[in-house]
Image (cartoon, rainbow, N blue to C red):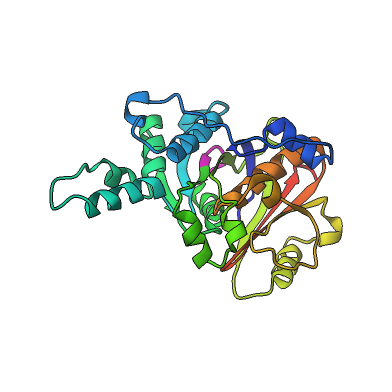
């Protein structure tokens, strides 16, 4: 795939950036509930959106502060299960309607492209717009899509990820093989990234490769992926792992699940963690391993010049 550089990243999760830096550096850190922040765009039309949608828009808005908005050529979102809050509201209103008229708002906002569509309207952007929903591997597919969609070096792709937390989600998670204890750790996550094919002084963290492997042992997938990129686990500076099903692995690294909780989008947080790691440790190389029920997503990043 085409290499991409991270201009900026933004997340909402239990580890604020300073605490995240401490965790990555092996220093004492503290965890706090994710801070719910609202975007400062189009407040009138956003007031009816779910909290999760607003948080995702906040992350995307933060990324846009450091870029030339006219350079944005694609807006791509990833979500494990889509707009759950509005979908549940719409289905509940149908079941209770008694054949009477119901509000169309939850149906409209329950569409998978709601967030990317709002960002496109805000930016007055008529470029490529897509949302990927492949459970826990959605973000990797979104990154691959972003790499394909960028045609020139001066273009920028906005890539975001979000999953909401509703009470019924714990029951859904159990159907995907999550234990009752794991289902109780489900929370919401959102993240956003501004990506470009060209390097600069301000964006020296590079996404070297992204891929998804299915129907293959994890260790074999990692070996093939690293060989393709001319390296091995011995030269990696760090491995960041999302492993909600607690699979036994022959590799070791920093597992993010205990510190950020569980969601189908928590793998996307791993890229933000890698981004911060490269800023702390220049000339480093990091592998993100995102283990999901249906396969494994792999992201290789490095500091420019590694």
Q: How many marks?
A: 0
| Image quadrant in which you'd find residue 198 | top right
Q: Is residue 251 magenta?
A: no
- Kindly give the residue lying farthest to the right in the view shown: 234
Q: Is residue 32 left or right of residue 59?
A: right
Instruction: Name the residue rendered at 42%, 50% in the picture.
Output: 130
Q: Nearer the viewer, residue 207 or 43?
A: 43
Residue 96 seen anywhere in this rendered image of the structure: yes
| Image quadrant in which you'd find residue 109 | top left
The quarter of the image holding the N terminus is bottom right
Residue 170, position as x, y percentages in the image: 50, 56
Position above or below: 21 against 274: above
Q: Nearer the viewer, residue 56 or 261?
A: 261
Residue 24, position as x, y percentages in the image: 78, 41
Residue 75, position as x, y percentages in the image: 45, 42
Position above or below: 43 against 289: above
Instruction: Name the residue rendered at 78%, 61% in the picture.
Output: 230
Residue 83 seen anywhere in this rendered image of the structure: no
Q: Is residue 276 left or right of residue 81?
A: right
Instruction: Name the residue rendered at 55%, 55% in the picture.
Output: 144
Position above or below: 170 against 203: below
Residue 206, position as x, y percentages in the image: 69, 45
| Image quadrant in which you'd find residue 260 | top right
Position above or below: 268 against 33: below
Highlighted range, magenta = 151-158
Magenta stretch, main secondary structure class: loop
């Amino acid at each position: 795939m085409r290499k991409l550089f991270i201009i900026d990243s933004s997340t909402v999760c239990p580890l604020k950036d300073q605490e995240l830096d401490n965790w990555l550096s092996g220093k004492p850190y503290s965890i706090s509930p994710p801070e719910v922040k609202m975007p400062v765009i189009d407040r009138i039309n956003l007031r009816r959106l779910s909290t999760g949608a607003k948080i995702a828009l906040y992350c995307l808005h933060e990324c846009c502060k450091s870029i030339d908005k006219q350079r944005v050529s694609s807006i791509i979102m990833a979500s494990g299960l889509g707009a759950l809050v509005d979908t549940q509201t719409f289905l509940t209103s149908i079941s209770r309607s008694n054949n009477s008229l119901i509000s169309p708002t939850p149906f409209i906002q329950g569409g998978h492209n709601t967030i990317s569509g709002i960002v496109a309207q805000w930016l007055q952007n008529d470029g490529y717009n897509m949302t990927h929903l492949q459970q826990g591997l959605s973000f990797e597919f979104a990154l691959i899509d972003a790499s394909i969609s960028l045609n020139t070096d001066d273009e920028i792709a906005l890539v975001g990820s979000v999953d909401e937390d509703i009470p019924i989600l714990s029951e859904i998670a159990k159907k995907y093989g999550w234990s009752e204890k794991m289902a109780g750790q489900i929370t919401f996550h959102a993240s956003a990234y501004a990506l470009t094919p060209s390097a600069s002084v301000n964006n020296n963290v590079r996404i070297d490769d992204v891929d998804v492997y299915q129907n293959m042992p994890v260790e074999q997938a990692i070996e093939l992926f690293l060989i393709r990129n001319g390296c091995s686990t011995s030269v990696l500076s760090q491995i960041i792992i999302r492993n909600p099903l607690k699979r036994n692995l022959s590799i070791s690294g920093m597992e993010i699940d205990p510190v950020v909780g569980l969601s189908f989008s928590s793998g996307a947080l791993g890229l933000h963690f890698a981004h911060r790691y490269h800023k702390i440790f220049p000339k480093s190389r990091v592998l993100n391993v995102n283990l999901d029920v249906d396969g494994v997503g792999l992201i290789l990043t490095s500091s420019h010049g590694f």
